[in-house]
Image (spheres, rainbow, N blue to C red):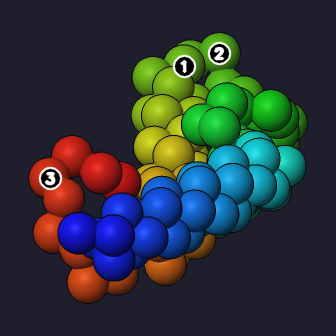
């Protein structure tokens, strides 16, 4: 019976270590940024690892008062691509903690 408690304590320590590593990885993700462009670079969107848009750059040539819809589409496309890249970066970084585990809803 005693060996079972020792194993349980050891497992809890390992889980605490993993939790600290995961928290550090999430913090580092928040500091990283990704960049996406649309319209051949006419619109650029930069997002951080927390899925916050931190910068939008629009080339003057993309601003056509007669075709606002095109500019809206370019901003939307670049934003969605930036958020997709954040998801990929998050899965790549956090996936190391869930390798071999089949836990639904975790990353």
Q: In the structure shown, which secondary structural element does the residue marked by tag 2 occupy?
A: loop
Depth order, front residue of 54/1: 1
Q: Position of residue 51 (x, y in %)?
A: 60, 37
**Res 68 label:** 1
Quadrant containing the N terminus in the rendered view: bottom left
Left-right relation of 23 to 58: left
- Crowding at dot 1, Cα within 10 Å, few <14 / some 14-19 / many 20+, comes out as few
- Quadrant of residue 8 within the rendered picture: bottom left
The residue singled out by tag 3 in the image is: 104
Depth order, front residue of 57/88: 88
The residue singled out by tag 2 in the image is: 65
Nearest to the eye among marks 2 and 1: give it: 1
Q: Position of residue 48 (x, y in %)?
A: 73, 44
Query: What is the C-alpha distance between the residues marked 3 and 1?
Result: 42 Å
Q: Mark 3 or mark 1, which has the lower sequence index?
A: 1
Q: Position of residue 102 (x, y in %)?
A: 16, 69
Residue at (26, 84) in percent of width and height? 100
Q: In the structure shown, which secondary structural element does the residue marked by tag 3 occupy?
A: loop
Query: What is the C-alpha distance between the residues marked 2 and 1?
Result: 6 Å
Residue at (82, 34) in percent of width and height? 55
In the image, is residue 50 above or below residue 85? Answer: above
């Amino acid at each position: 019976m005693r060996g079972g408690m020792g194993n349980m304590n050891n497992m809890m320590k390992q889980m605490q270590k993993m939790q600290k590593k995961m928290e550090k990885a999430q913090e580092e993700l928040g500091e990283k940024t990704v960049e996406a462009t649309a319209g051949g670079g006419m619109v650029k969107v930069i997002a951080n690892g927390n899925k916050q848009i931190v910068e939008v750059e629009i080339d003057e040539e993309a601003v056509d008062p007669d075709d606002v819809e095109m500019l809206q589409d370019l901003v939307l496309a670049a934003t969605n691509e930036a958020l997709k890249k954040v998801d990929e970066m998050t899965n790549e970084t956090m996936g190391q903690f869930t390798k071999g585990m089949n836990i639904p809803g975790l990353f």
